[in-house]
Amino acid sequence: MKGSTHTVVQNGLDVLLAGGVPSLRGKRLGLITNPTGINRALQGGVDLLHADPRFELCALFGPEHGIRGDAQAGVHVQACTDSRTGLPVYSLYGETRRPRPEMLQGLDALLFDLQDIGVRYATYLSTLVYAMEAAAEAGLLFVVLDRPNPLGGQLLAGNILHPDFSSFVGIANIPVCHGLTVGEFARLYAAEHALPEPMVVAMRGWRRDLWFDQLDLPWVQPSPNLPTLDAVALYPATCLLEGLSCSEGRGTTRPFEILGAPDIDPFVLAETLTAHALPGVAFRPLYFMPTFSKHAQTRCGGIQIYLLDRTQIPLMELGLHLLADLRRLSQLSRTWIQGENGTYFLDLLCGSDQVRLALEAGASVAEITANWEDGLAAFAQRRAPFLLYQD
């Protein structure tokens, strides 16, 4: 646990277990969770709710990476029986990503308790949307046990997703950094899509100006490749490299902080990026060898990104410079990754094909981002009625 200089926060699970939600007592519950679903004492919500006589925990649901967090990105997870509780575990990242009616049979409420990262690309928001829709169809109460946005609640960055490019890595027309907790997002999405209003078990003590390392809460990595808050902070920028054939650092000890390709001169890349004079960030040239994922077991040249002042970094500009410079300096990284249906993965991440087309046409980063501030200002007004916490 952290010291007394950090703000004390009770997450939604803590509030629920402290007796803050009497209406859920005696209810037959399904729980969507993973290793991040813990209380302040590092105890898992699955075990706590299963052992608590006030509740009847009947079924578990696992998102991407599985209910125990042991599956790599994109790996399908199979249904199973939980070895500790004997409860059925239904996968929401396998044969289906949406709870089926038979999975929800006999339940009174479906609970969502996952630590999201505050970035549109992450798939937990898509799991929330699908689960909220399935609960509505089944006539179940949908409950969000709220948790902090690790990046705080004030950071808004990126373009607004166009509905034509909605996917599992971008389910809603929100910016890349949306500054919402999962509970706030659920309220906004439900209102804008005519779904029943979810019950949000709100945190106590959290403010929008607080990043996760300013809280008196234990950090659990939200996915296998986001081990640190620095990785999460850079993820809005460096995740865009998943749209290219270069390495975004998966298979290293610093994914999304280290990146490169086998044909990159790390010193040239570091000098090129430094010349952009982006505030709050620095670049160290290095060589690395991923143990898995892109360019596994191959020596790569690249950089490690250092956060000097995370409040000053223009994240999306950094991501666009990375895309442009890597495509120019690395022949191996010029290829856009496409899915089986020919869709460009970068388009799904960006929520539009305009970024890719502009980069191909040689547009500057300033030209690409010219109109994004208007969209962010409009989104700030859209989200205002659904905010639960103050600055």
Image (cartoon, rainbow, N blue to C red):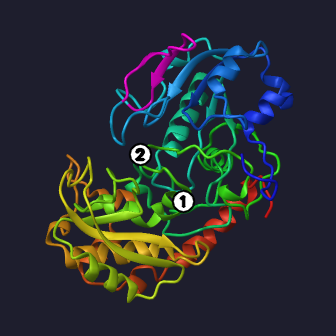
- Circle 1 residue: 174
- Residue 87 percent across, percent down from the top left: 55, 13
Tell me the kind of residue under disc 2. Phe
Left or right of residue 276, residue 11 in this image: right
Tell me the kind of residue under disc 1. Ile
- Residue 39 percent across, percent down from the top left: 70, 35
- Work out which quarter of the rendered image holds the N terminus and state it: top right
Residue at 40% over, 77% down: 283
Quick one: 100 or 231, which is closer to the camera?
231
- Residue 240 percent across, percent down from the top left: 37, 63
Disc 2 to disc 1, how far (Cα)? 14 Å
Quick one: 319 or 383, which is closer to the camera?
319
- Circle 2 residue: 168
Q: Is 141 placed above or below 229 here?
A: above
Left or right of residue 346, residue 117 in this image: right
Q: Is 226 placed above or below 352 here?
A: above
The answer to which quarter of the image holds residue 168 is top left
First to last magenta residue range: 77-93
